[in-house]
Image: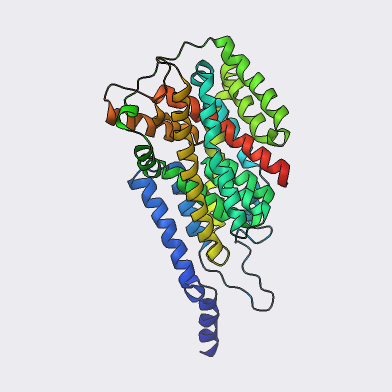
């Protein structure tokens, strides 16, 4: 009988119930909230559902041997475990360039090619990154940590993961979850800022229809674009190279199978793995801290600065633009890298002001410029801090 009782007691020690803390329950609850928002609200479900489920996986309580300080070899932080091996793609920065390859293969740069001046809006929106970098420094973060936190303002999850893996891997979980969370909340965060910074008269500005872009221009753009940006910021080569290469596969017309693979099965698999492992890395004992909360706050502030700078710079361009070439400042929010969600916000808010004024085709120009801009900003930070 004693043997049975001892066996049951030993079994109980290895269960999640015996090792559960309130911190585990909090993180599991956050994971459930992410899944609910993805399924019910349709807020970036391809990101929030894997991240949310990953949070649950990462916070199943494990038995820790008091003598060795190690648990069962299944946790994402246990060397050699399956989750740990998959997490290497995040920790070593393998997944983000592959996602950029898929983004390039899905992206049509025609709007930017036809209206090249709108690239300036995408550049202006990157001020959120450098603003948050300076704020992070004043709050006691090291330069490397501040650089990794600042990139959240680009609203680009893969870029945030890539840069944090190089500069501040210990903060990667908080930074990645923060970046993806704000990407999902683009419509909620950006609309009030856009309405606050624009007048009714500005919201109904009608922009000239973009010119038609030739196929030759589409083929030349990724080659010239890569050479120019890579020569300026060589440290951004992993992201910029894969982005423009993916776009060349799409536009060349002779590599349709490769483009279809990059924009379909490949990016789907990598997105699933990056979401699941990032979520699983948010273990309560690692993730729940005052620094994580501060990172979330700084990430939100950087996103607000980025959106505001994009809108305000579009207003400034209007001051310098002649009649007939005015810019609707509502497209300024699209300067962040959340493609195509921020461009859709421009369209939605524009239609509310004028039901016949479609801004999506115009907003896509600063939106895709923001993708390039965030990669360039990451390269600048990596070059100075790496």
Count of residue discs: 0
12 over 80 or under it: above or below: below
Foreground pick, 6 / 213:
213
The residue shown at (58%, 33%) is: 373
The residue shown at (62%, 55%) is: 137
The residue shown at (51%, 72%) is: 15
- Give the quadrant of residue 318: top left
Q: Position of residue 221 (x, y in %)?
A: 61, 18
Quick check: 386 left or right of 164? right
Foreground pick, 158 / 85:
158
- Give the quadrant of residue 285: bottom right
110 over 298 or under it: above or below: above
The residue shown at (51%, 50%) is: 299
Quick check: 30 left or right of 291? left
Res 191 visible: yes
Foreground pick, 16 / 104:
104
Quick check: 121 left or right of 133? left
Foreground pick, 324 / 133:
324
Q: Position of residue 386 (x, y in %)?
A: 73, 46
Q: Position of residue 222 (x, y in %)?
A: 62, 21
Q: Position of residue 168 (x, y in %)?
A: 66, 53
């Amino acid at each position: 009988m004693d043997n049975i009782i001892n066996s049951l007691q030993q079994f109980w020690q290895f269960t999640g119930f015996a090792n559960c803390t309130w911190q585990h329950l909090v993180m599991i609850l956050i994971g459930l909230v992410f899944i609910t928002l993805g399924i019910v609200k349709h807020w970036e479900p391809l990101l929030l559902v894997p991240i949310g489920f990953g949070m649950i996986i990462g916070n199943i309580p494990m038995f820790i041997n008091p003598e060795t300080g190690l648990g069962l070899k299944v946790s994402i932080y246990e060397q050699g475990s399956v989750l740990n091996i998959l997490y290497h793609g995040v920790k070593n920065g393998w997944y983000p360039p592959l996602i950029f390859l898929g983004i390039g293969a899905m992206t049509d740069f025609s709007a930017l090619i036809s209206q090249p001046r709108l690239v300036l809006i995408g550049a202006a929106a990157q001020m959120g990154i450098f603003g948050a970098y300076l704020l992070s420094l004043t709050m006691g973060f090291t330069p490397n940590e501040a650089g990794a936190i600042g990139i959240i303002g680009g609203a680009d999850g893969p870029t945030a993961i890539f840069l944090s893996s190089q500069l501040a891997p210990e903060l990667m979980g908080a930074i990645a979850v923060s970046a993806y969370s704000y990407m999902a909340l683009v419509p909620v965060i950006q609309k009030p800022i856009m309405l606050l910074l624009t007048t009714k008269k500005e919201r109904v500005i009608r922009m000239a229809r973009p010119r038609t872009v030739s196929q030759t221009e589409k083929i030349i753009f990724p080659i010239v674009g890569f050479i120019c940006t890579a020569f300026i910021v060589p440290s951004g080569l992993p992201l910029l190279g894969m982005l423009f290469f993916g776009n060349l596969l799409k536009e060349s017309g002779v590599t349709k199978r490769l483009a279809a693979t990059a924009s379909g099965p490949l990016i789907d698999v990598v997105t699933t793995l990056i979401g699941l492992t990032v979520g699983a890395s948010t273990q309560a004992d690692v993730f729940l801290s005052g620094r994580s909360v501060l990172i979330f706050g700084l990430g939100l502030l950087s996103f607000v600065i980025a959106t505001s700078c994009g809108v305000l710079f579009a207003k400034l361009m209007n001051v310098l633009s002649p009649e007939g070439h005015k810019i609707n400042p509502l497209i300024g929010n699209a300067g962040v890298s959340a493609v195509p969600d921020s461009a859709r916000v421009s369209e939605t808010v524009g239609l509310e002001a004028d039901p016949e004024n479609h801004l999506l085709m115009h907003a896509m120009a600063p939106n895709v410029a923001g993708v390039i801009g965030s990669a360039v900003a990451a390269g600048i930070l990596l070059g100075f801090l790496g």
